[in-house]
Amino acid sequence: MKYCELVNTKQGSKSTHRYSNGNTLPLVQRPFGMAAFAPQTEEHSIRWYYHPDSHSLEGIRLTHQPSPWIADYGAFVFIPQNDMMGGEGEERWSGFRPKEAILTPYYLKTRFLRSRCDFELTPTERGASALISFSDEGKNYLSVLPVTGNYTYRFDEKKNMLFASTDMHMSGEAVKFRTYLAVQFPEGSVDAAETLISSGNNFKSGSKTRGKKAGIHICLKNKVTEIKLAISYISFDQAVLNLKSELDGKDFSSLKAEAEEIWEDYLSRIKIEAADEKQLRTFYSCMYRAFLYPHKCYEYDKSGKAVHYCPHDGKTYDGVRYTDNGFWDTYRTVYPFFALVAKEELREMLTAFIYEYKESGWLPRWLSIGECGCMPSTLVDAVIADGAAKGFIDEPTLRVALEGMLKHSVTNPPESRFGRNGAESYCKYGYVPYDEQKESVNLTLDAAYGDWCIAEIAKILGEDKIEKEYRKRATYYKNIFDPETGFMRPKDKKGNFRPDFSPIMWGRDYTEGSAWQNSFAVPHDIEGLAELYGGKDKLIAKIDELFATEPDYLIRGYNCEIHEITELAAIDFGQCAISNQPSFHIPYIYSALGCVEKSAYWVERLCKEAFSYEDDGFPGDEDNGTTAIWYIFGVLGFYPFCPGKPEYVKGKKQVIKAIIGEKEIDADKFDSNIINYKDLI
């Protein structure tokens, strides 16, 4: 079986600003690669720049975009042109036939009808090889063009190499940031005298230019040209070194075969016998999504040592680094999944995330080149605790992690994008007051969970005093429970509940949801939560009520309808908004309380009705593997209900057979509702 043939890389890409079916891109890249590539169809929408129904193509984009909400950085666009040239999207776009384009994880091929040119590309970790095949002789060009930001270009005729750079970044910190691009052309393939530079749609002869709308157009002598390219965040010299180490001595065909072999290895790390064709293709399309992020953000110097650009101060440091990841989303599924199928990669990622603290002074929250703090709280706590519980972090590194976790648990950050918002208030009141912080309910619940994670790490390290203190703090979620309504509610500094409460009002005190979606976020102490309701049966009844309640909503907290609200109502599984992460664990609350059959019922329905391998195949934002892996866990029949505990709760196996690595896993055969991590590896 060729697993890549089962993947639809466009799964989830049929999305808009107002309605997400995934908000994904059909990325051609190596697993966790530093350089990714995708078709660009819509320049006017810098963030939503690809749509699968478009018949216009503005070029192939070198991209790092983790999400349209975070946007891109270090981007360049490549397009073959001739005849009437264009520098901007409205002037350069070409017709193409979407159904004839080939988009696989390891290979892209499309035909630009306007220039009568086939463009093929296969990726390396930090670059790519591209094959450009014009049908006609004449003045044919490869244009390298900007997206947004400042750009520089210089063609070196002696080296047959284009050097380009950009400071483009659209979110977060990026001190002295540049992406350096080196493009190697074959000897004798470029007509330097006919090479053009442009500013927007104004063209002239030249081989060197800079500016916000600057572009360069390399005149190619031959109908067919194979180019090689690589990027660096450190320097042009490093970009050339990356190019030589990854592409020298290899032609397009060998690089393509190499990329395919790597993807086949990753996709086959779980082998399934599917119930039907839809399940098979959906599963492996989701497997592809699972291995795209986080992106590697490190390179190798001349001695073979790993080095990386640091966005906090613009310097270069030794060691590995990863980026393009938001822990608020990914802690729930991604890293517990890697603990099963990408163990060595996970070990490296955890080291990188923890040592981010040494460079920035804070453990990371949402990295896209640097810290952008897009979502609240410090859910990296859960990622670290889960890695520690499963044996992926050595003691010295874990002590660095504990230092960083303790800091953000008691210290207000200097900027809102770092650390825990409302940390000192949480320490003072035992909750985060709504008259001091927005989204105070989620900040309180996430802090309690984070404190439990700290206690678990303190236990591993033998720090008894810290463990005892943080075990107590982990129960502070109880301070905002309202027994009269059965919901977590915001309190002010005096301890009074906010008076104008509605369980269907989104925002204000809740993150991307209402009280229905956010009141049950106590994965570390589901038994304690049940006690607040009067016992397990009462909490189960409350979750029954959640699924039975109409997906009604009020928008007062946002003053407009955000897309997550629209998706809740459209998917219609009551108040379970499986379109967004706060609801991911809700169907599994049943199983965590011993009622596996109810979890199995809802998860099976959600997997079958809300997911597919089609271009609109997700019920909401996919978010760097989180939603894809939710589906994978769903059909395998188990789920990481509480990252930080080396266990998974039982669901119901929906595939006929599943093999992880070399071990067949049949969740249905486990007697307990809790499956130990060691029994899965």
Image (cartoon, rainbow, N blue to C red):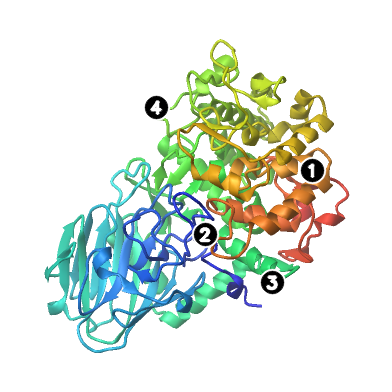
Distance from the alpha carbon under mark 3 to that under mark 2: 24 Å
Indicate the secondary structure of the residue bearing disc 1.
helix
Say which label, 4 or 3, has the lower sequence index: 3
Distance from the alpha carbon under mark 2 to that under mark 4: 32 Å
Say which label, 3 or 1, has the lower sequence index: 3
Say which label, 2 or 1, has the lower sequence index: 2
Asked if the residue at tag 2 contacts the one at tag 3, i.e. Cβ–Cβ closer than 8 Å, the answer is no
Identify residue type, mark 4.
Pro
Q: Which residue is mark 4?
A: 414
Q: Is residue 673 left or right of residue 270?
A: right
Identify residue type, mark 3.
Glu
Q: Marks 4 and 1: which is nearer the front?
A: 1
Residue 210 seen in render: yes
Residue 467 seen in render: no
Q: Which residue is mark 2?
A: 292
Q: Is residue 631 left or right of residue 132?
A: right
Asked if the residue at tag 3 contacts the one at tag 4, i.e. Cβ–Cβ closer than 8 Å, the answer is no
Distance from the alpha carbon under mark 3 to that under mark 1: 28 Å
Indicate the secondary structure of the residue bearing disc 3.
helix
| In the foreground, 669 or 125 | 669
Distance from the alpha carbon under mark 4 to that under mark 1: 41 Å
Q: Residue at x 31, y 73 (%)?
A: 94
Q: Which residue is mark 3?
A: 277
Residue 370, percent from left and from top: 40, 44
Q: Which residue is mark 1?
A: 591
Q: Residue at x 24, y 67 (%)?
A: 91
Quadrant assignment, res 196: bottom left
Residue 72, percent from left and from top: 38, 53
Q: Is residue 456 left or right of residue 443?
A: right
